[in-house]
Amino acid sequence: MFRPLSLFVGLRYTRSKRRNGYVSLFSFVSIITLCLGVMLLIVILSVMNGFEKEVRERILNMISHITVSGFDGKIQDWQSVVKKVRQNPEVVGTAPFIRAEGMLIYKRQVQGSLYRGIDPKLERSVSKVHSSMVAGSIDDLVPGKFRIILGQDLAFKLGVDVGQKVTMVTPTANVTPAGVMPRLKRFTVVGIFKVGFYQYDSAVGLIHIEDAARVFRKKDGVSGVQVQVKNLLNVAATKKLLKKQFEHEYWVKDWSYYHANWFSAVQMEKRMMFVILFIIIVVVSVNIISSMITVVNDKRSDIAIMRTFGAKTSTILRIFLVQGSVIGVVGTAMGVLLGVLLSLNLDNLYTQLVNFTGKQVIDPSVYLISDLPTDVQLEQVLVIGISTLVMSIIATIIPAITASHINPADALRYE
């Protein structure tokens, strides 16, 4: 079967044993280093993608896509706000809420808490907290009964379980003849939820919106209105329209506003990690240059013989481009394959590690989640693979040009 001379000789050089043992070692090290660089880049970016995606999903289990709230933290005529919001075809759910802060006391345990007054029926259309219940149901929040649902970590810190009573301390106070006294109210724990996001599981308590209005003296007003849209990708556009509609009346913020610093930090870390790991690939490319120069020096006599038999300069150039490209193709292919396979199975490997050691490596109080999710994005894998392959091929050009300009007489002088 006919094959171009440059391809035939280039592949033969790749497979053949060299007189200089260091040539094979350099090529092997170049392939392995390139493979490890690509694999690490894919795995680390996949972990950061998965971490960001998982946190986003868990946040959206608890809060809505968009929040409309008053400049002073109150909306009196929230029904009219809901009516206006519902005019947008992208909106699929709305629900009023009351937000407040305070403390919860059970026996000798005291914990700061964030309270959310909700309407259980309407809450289902704007969040997924109802599907995150570990015990009880959000429908157990009945107005006038003063019941509360706690995050799992908050309940654990207090040492409280379903059916027990906790004391709520509000930031407001009562003025009595005996002096200023804090306002206290007893609530019965009727449920426990776990959305998997430590910030909510360790601090949030859900109560009925009517009970919240009484305890926190909101009367008929609410803190804001939660809005759910059809497609998460259209949140920015919908927010822009609502912001224009309620201009100078209310705040309109999307879900990312409340965690903007965290997501900005993650994006910055992803960019910096990409740059740092890509430097490894650049170093490997330099290593490929040194490896190919060693190959050229080892094959000087072969090059001279081919030149004397009429091989053109372009043929010699292509021979060593093929040989150098093999290093790039094999190293990149192995790195992409191992990186994708490791990323897809990393969560299972981490679970087995935790089960084997009995220690939780990822502290949810620090990293917000306790597992190791991954999200392999095809676009990133293609960018990493193609850019690495291009750089490795470019790295072979200088040694290949050097080989093509070898003078046969000089190369054979001492043979």
Image (cartoon, rainbow, N blue to C red):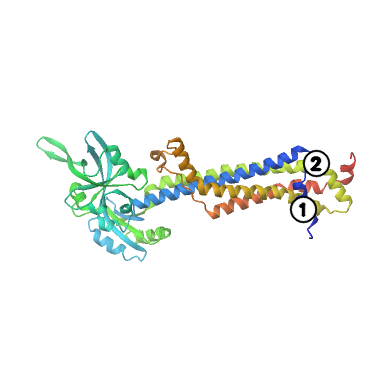
Label located before the other in sequence (2 or 1): 2
Q: Is residue 164 left or right of residue 330?
A: left
The residue tagged with tag 1: helix, strand or loop? helix
Three-letter residue code for mark 2: Asp
Identity of the residue drawn at 55% across and 50% down: 340
* Residue furthest top in the image: 108
Identity of the residue drawn at 78% across and 38% down: 20
Three-letter residue code for mark 1: Arg
Which label sits in the foreground, 2 or 1? Answer: 2
The disc at residue 298 is 2
Quarter placement of the N terminus: bottom right
Identity of the residue drawn at 27% across and 38% down: 158
Counting from the top left corner in percent of width and height, residue 54 is at: 43, 49
Q: Using the image as rendered, state which of residue 12 and residue 38 is in the foreground.
A: 12
| Residue at the disc numbered 1 | 318
Q: Is residue 335 left or right of residue 54?
A: right
Counting from the top left corner in percent of width and height, residue 350 is at: 47, 42
Counting from the top left corner in percent of width and height, residue 146 is at: 19, 48
The residue tagged with tag 2: helix, strand or loop? helix
Task: From this view, report whether residue 324 is shown above or below residue 241.
Answer: above
